[in-house]
Image (cartoon, grey):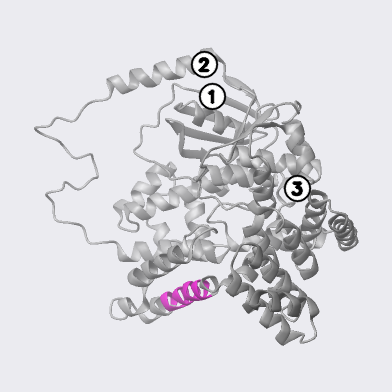
């Protein structure tokens, strides 16, 4: 079955195939660029492309996993899967390291193609990937990030009917970090409602709210009634029939005598020694390409202190430099020390609440700046990857290009929004205040006033108090000498019953400004 990407974009096709639990191949064509995605029971398990940048050899070379001398020993004129097998057979990579590389390759390919808003697609349920390969792609994360980067006009075109119904997904636990505005919009949907109702409730610009609805629906946080259906009932029925017949024909291993699959060591054989060098190279590649401390530690942005600690200790146990002092040369040992120092720095930053809040604020600013870059790239040039293993150089280049293109009127617009928000807050229109102050904070996230008053407005909404705390803490990190921000945080802690914390913040405020009457009054009240 065939169609056009401007009518059924890739993110929606993947969502539909996943929901219907289908297998097969989805071919994409845009100008001369071709990509094929392979599905098994709704999961993306592999992808291939004619774009040289996504060739496995080019990826391995670009990521610095192997040297040119090592690559020269392997025949390069073969398919990606054959090339990967050759690397394993030559002892250059372990099977686990190859699996990680394939997952990364497929993820980067998806980062590029998810931003296509024109081109052709063709779904064929008959295609079955014979090779034993399964990329572990974090597909919901990629779908959400693509929604954050697609052009506003294209996203608006996905919501021609504003009477479509939205409903929260009960206990959605997707291990995905939401942007503050996404969390805010999600908090508005506490019961089924129409898109038009949410647009009026959000207090945000329509284009922003539609983008967040789209991202939250693709991420599995919202059920959206009336998704455009790309696949016909006949195609879906045929796909299920092919899948069922393939399952019936699959050979069942004998209980008496089982032969190991080719290339897999039988259990009775001596256990293979871990490929230490391959694991190190995979670690180097992943750490080098991580764009933030969470990716370095391989945790979600919402990770708890305990999860951060476990992740760091796991790294220390496996890759502490002292373990390799006698088994590697001085040059490699120095590299291990350098990488481990970065991991330690990441952990030190994230384990402290204040430094973590400041760091999160910096990340939000980078993401806002980078968001407008991808749509300007030609179709045959890979977009800067937004996957977990996005090359840091690409990300920095994106920030630089985007920063140069930011219009000089942004600060003025942010100040206008801020003043509108203050006026709305003083008049009691909290929802309008949240929308305007949030817009100011997103436009100029390094301005502590905007972050503090946005958090102050959010504090009035019970479900948004965690975000309120993050915003006010970000303001304090940006301007630690402003006593009024400490008072705002104390008021929030008082609201939620954290009296000791509130008193601590008020005492800090008075140490900064002993004449601060608001701090003195609230502290006396709490102590009285």
Query: Disc 1 or disc 2, which is closer to the eye?
Result: 2
Tell whether position 68 is magenta.
no
User: What distance separates the C-alpha of mark 2 from that of mark 3?
Assistant: 35 Å
The residue lying toward the viewer, choosing from 109 and 89, is: 109
Q: Quadrant of residue 442?
A: bottom right
- The answer to whether one can see residue 496 in this image is yes
The picture places residue 174, in percent across and down from the top left corner, at 51, 46
Q: Which residue is mark 2?
A: 235
Q: Which residues are magenta?
A: 335-348
Identify whether 340 is placed above or below 148.
Answer: below
Question: Which comes before the other along the chain, label 1 or label 2?
Answer: 1
Q: Is residue 487 left or right of residue 317?
A: right
Classify mark 3: residues with Cα within 10 Å, few (<14), some (14-19) or many (20+).
few
Identify whether 181 is placed above or below 324.
Answer: above
Do the numbered discs 1 and 2 sit on residues whose CB atoms are within 8 Å?
A: yes
Q: Which residue is mark 3?
A: 376
The picture places residue 374, in percent across and down from the top left corner, at 70, 49
Residue drawn at x 54%, y 24% is 123
């Amino acid at each position: 079955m065939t169609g056009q990407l401007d009518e059924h974009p890739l993110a929606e096709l993947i969502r539909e195939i996943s929901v219907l639990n289908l297998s097969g191949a989805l071919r994409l064509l845009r100008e001369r660029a071709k990509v094929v995605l392979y599905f098994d029971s709704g999961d993306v398990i592999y992808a291939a492309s004619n774009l040289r940048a996504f060739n496995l050899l080019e990826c391995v070379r670009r990521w610095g996993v192997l040297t040119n001398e090592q690559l020269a020993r392997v025949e390069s004129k073969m398919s990606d899967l054959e090339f990967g097998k050759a690397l394993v057979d030559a002892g250059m990579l372990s099977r686990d390291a190859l699996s990680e590389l394939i997952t990364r390759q497929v993820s980067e390919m998806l980062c590029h193609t998810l931003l296509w808003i024109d081109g052709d697609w063709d779904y064929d349920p008959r295609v079955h990937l014979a090779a034993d390969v399964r990329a572990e792609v974090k597909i919901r994360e990629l779908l959400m990030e693509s929604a954050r980067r697609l052009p506003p006009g294209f996203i608006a075109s996905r919501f021609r009917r504003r009477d479509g119904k939205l409903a929260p997904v009960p206990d959605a636990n997707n291990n995905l970090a939401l942007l503050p505005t996404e969390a805010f919009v999600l908090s508005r949907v506490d019961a089924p409602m129409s898109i038009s109702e949410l647009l009026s409730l959000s207090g945000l610009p329509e284009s922003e709210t539609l983008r967040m609805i789209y991202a939250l629906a693709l991420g599995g946080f919202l059920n959206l009634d009336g998704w455009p259906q790309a696949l016909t009932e006949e195609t879906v029925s045929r796909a299920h029939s092919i899948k069922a017949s393939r399952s019936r024909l699959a050979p069942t291993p004998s209980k008496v005598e089982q032969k190991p699959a080719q290339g897999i060591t039988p259990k009775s054989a001596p256990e293979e020694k871990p490929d230490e060098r391959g694991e190190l190279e995979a670690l180097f590649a992943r750490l080098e390409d991580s764009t933030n401390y969470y990716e370095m530690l391989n945790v979600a942005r919402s990770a708890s202190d305990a999860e951060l600690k476990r992740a760091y200790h796991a790294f220390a146990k496996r890759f502490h430099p002292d373990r390799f002092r006698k088994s590697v040369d001085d040059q490699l040992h120095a590299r291990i020390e350098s990488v481990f120092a970065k991991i330690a720095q990441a952990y030190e930053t994230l384990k402290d609440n204040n430094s973590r809040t400041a760091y999160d604020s910096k990340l939000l600013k980078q993401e806002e700046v980078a968001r407008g870059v991808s749509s300007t790239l030609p179709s045959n040039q890979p977009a800067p990857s937004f996957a977990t293993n996005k090359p840091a150089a690409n990300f920095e280049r994106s920030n630089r290009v985007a920063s140069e293109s930011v219009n000089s009127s942004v600060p003025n617009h942010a100040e206008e929004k801020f003043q509108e928000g203050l006026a709305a807050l003083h008049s009691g229109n909290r929802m309008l205040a949240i929308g305007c102050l949030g817009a100011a904070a997103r436009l100029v996230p390094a301005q502590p006033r905007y972050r503090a008053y946005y958090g102050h407005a959010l504090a009035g909404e019970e479900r948004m108090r965690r975000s309120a705390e993050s915003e006010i803490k970000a303001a304090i990190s940006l301007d630690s000498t402003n006593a009024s921000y400490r008072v705002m945080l104390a008021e929030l802690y008082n609201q939620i019953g954290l009296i000791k914390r509130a008193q601590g913040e008020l005492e800090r405020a008075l140490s900064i400004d002993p004449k601060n009457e608001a701090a003195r009054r609230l502290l006396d009240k709490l102590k009285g």
